[in-house]
Image: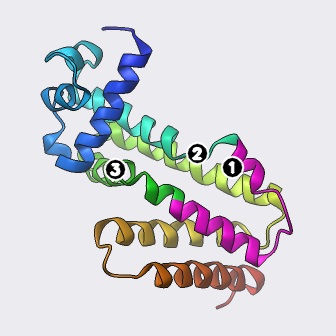
Amino acid sequence: MRRNPERRQSLIDAAIEVLAREGARGLTFRAVDAEAAVPMGTASNYFASRDDLFTQVGGRIYERLLPDEATIARTREGVQDQARYAELMHELVDRVSAFDSGYLALLELRLESTRRPELRAVLTKRIREDIDTNIGNHTASGLPGDTTSVLLLYLTLNWLIVERLTLPDIFTEQEIRELVDAAVQRSLDVGADGQT
């Protein structure tokens, strides 16, 4: 196995693009080599198998989807009210949607994980860590709502992003803004009294 970390990362990033464009069946070493513009056979020198490549891609997508430290720091600025919460959720939807190939590749990985137990384990661990981090950041931020609010928004906004990226004509950008605002407001209503 080759050990050049920059080359490995470049190959994984190329694999994300292939996976988003061609699906799981199209994710071959040859396709990754072509996408990365490296000599044929390079990817097979860095990954022991396609399973290895799938699991490496699963970890890398999340590295690229996570906000940077400056973005996290900004979440703690200003008045921590419902309007601020909605603003942060709009930023989240826009940031994740901007990495469209990563999100689409993640959808492919989720489907593939139903057939690959090692990939399922990687994604389960990574996504659970992400959920726990979101809950922890929310608790520390002083924003309104509780754990259930965070989970409801996680589930709702994930599907909204799926719609935005896969069927972009379903909702206008204005409708997306309104839906995010409504999702925040309603998740907080549920969190406040346990009822809708």
Query: In the rendering, at what x and y percent does residue 70 appear?
Result: 72, 44
Q: Label for residue 101?
A: 3
Name the main secondary structure of what is drawn in magenta: helix
Classed neighbour count for the residue bearing mark 3: other residues with Cα under 10 Å, few (<14), some (14–19), many (≥20): many
In front of the other: 34 or 2: 34
Mark nearer the N terminus (1 vs 2): 1
Identify the amino acid type marked 3: Ser
Point 64% across, 51% down: residue:
132
Disc 1 crowd rating (10 Å Cα; few below 14, some 14-19, many 20+) is few
Whether residue 110 is situated above or below residue 69 in the rendered picture: below
Instruction: Look at the picture and state if 26 lies above or below 108.
Output: above
- Depth check, mark 2 against mark 3: the one in front is 3
- Disc 1 and disc 2 in contact, CB within 8 angstroms: no
The residue pinned by badge 1 equals: 71
Q: Earlier in the sequence, mark 2 or mark 3?
A: 3
CA gap, disc 1 to disc 2? 19 Å
